[in-house]
Amino acid sequence: MAKGDTFFLRTTLTSSGTNYVSDDIDISAYTDPARGRVLVVDRSFITFGTDGNGPIVPLDVVASGTGSRAMGAQITSEKQTALVETSNNSLMAKVNIYAAVGTAGIITNMVEQNAMNPGEFTGGFIVPTDAISCGIDTGTAFNGELDVGFLLEVHTEKLSLQRIQELLVSLTAN
């Protein structure tokens, strides 16, 4: 359950062909790890749309004819250079989108695999770093670039001994 003193952090990434694109949200102004003050993520959301602020249409997927595209998006508590496996302890949210265009130029399938989106964290996801990293990657470039929005509901917390122990277990468990 979110605390009463929550606030929101957000960023948007625009896809760039088949390149991994990332952005770090600097949270150092909210934290002081040496004194036990950390940022805790209560909820996270990832959304997909066009770079023109609209819904994804067939022309965004393929230039003409039929075809399909896929994109993955993630939020982690550490800087990444590619999408990570779900076993990575820094991963707090991950979602994939698949879009297919069939004959007559219509979207025949659009699926968002979102087992970790939105992310709701009982007790919160403790971020033991000074940045939250958001990233996206595609296998084959979409015809039109997509915007991926990241929204995090967060609060700051001074860690108790019990919460420090929970953090250590979560960072080392696999």
Image: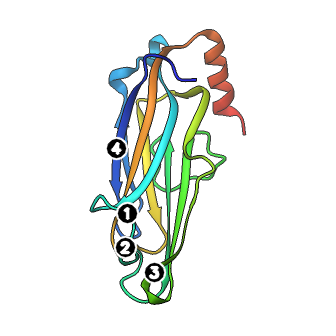
Marks 1 and 4 in Cβ contact (< 8 Å): no
Query: In the picture provided, is 105 more to the left or to the right than 113?
Result: left
- Mark 1 vs 2, N-terminal side: 1
Label 1 environment density (alpha carbons within 10 Å; few <14, some 14–19, many ≥20): few
Q: Which residue is mark 1?
A: 55
In the rendering, at what x and y percent does residue 101 appear? 48, 80
In the rendering, at what x and y percent does residue 4 appear? 47, 16
Q: Which residue is mark 4?
A: 11
Residue at image location 56% in from the left, 52% down from the top: 84
Marks 4 and 2, Cα distance to the nearest angstrom?
A: 21 Å
Quadrant housing the N terminus: top right
Q: Which mark is residue 106?
A: 3
- Mark 4 vs 3, N-terminal side: 4
Front label number (4 vs 3): 3
- Mark 1 vs 3, N-terminal side: 1
Q: Is residue 112 among what the camera can see? A: yes
In the rendering, at what x and y percent does residue 52 appear? 27, 62
Query: In the picture provided, is 22 more to the left or to the right than 72?
Result: left
Q: Considering depth in this image, is 57 or 124 the residue closer to the camera?
A: 57
In the rendering, at what x and y percent does residue 18 appear? 41, 69
Marks 1 and 3, Cα distance to the nearest angstrom?
A: 14 Å
Label 2 environment density (alpha carbons within 10 Å; few <14, some 14–19, many ≥20): many
Q: Considering depth in this image, is 115 or 174 the residue closer to the camera?
A: 115
Q: Which residue is mark 2?
A: 60
Q: Quadrant of residue 162?
A: top right
SS under mark 3: loop
Q: Is residue 98 above or below residue 103?
A: above
SS under mark 2: helix
- Mark 3 vs 2, N-terminal side: 2
Marks 3 and 2, Cα distance to the nearest angstrom?
A: 11 Å
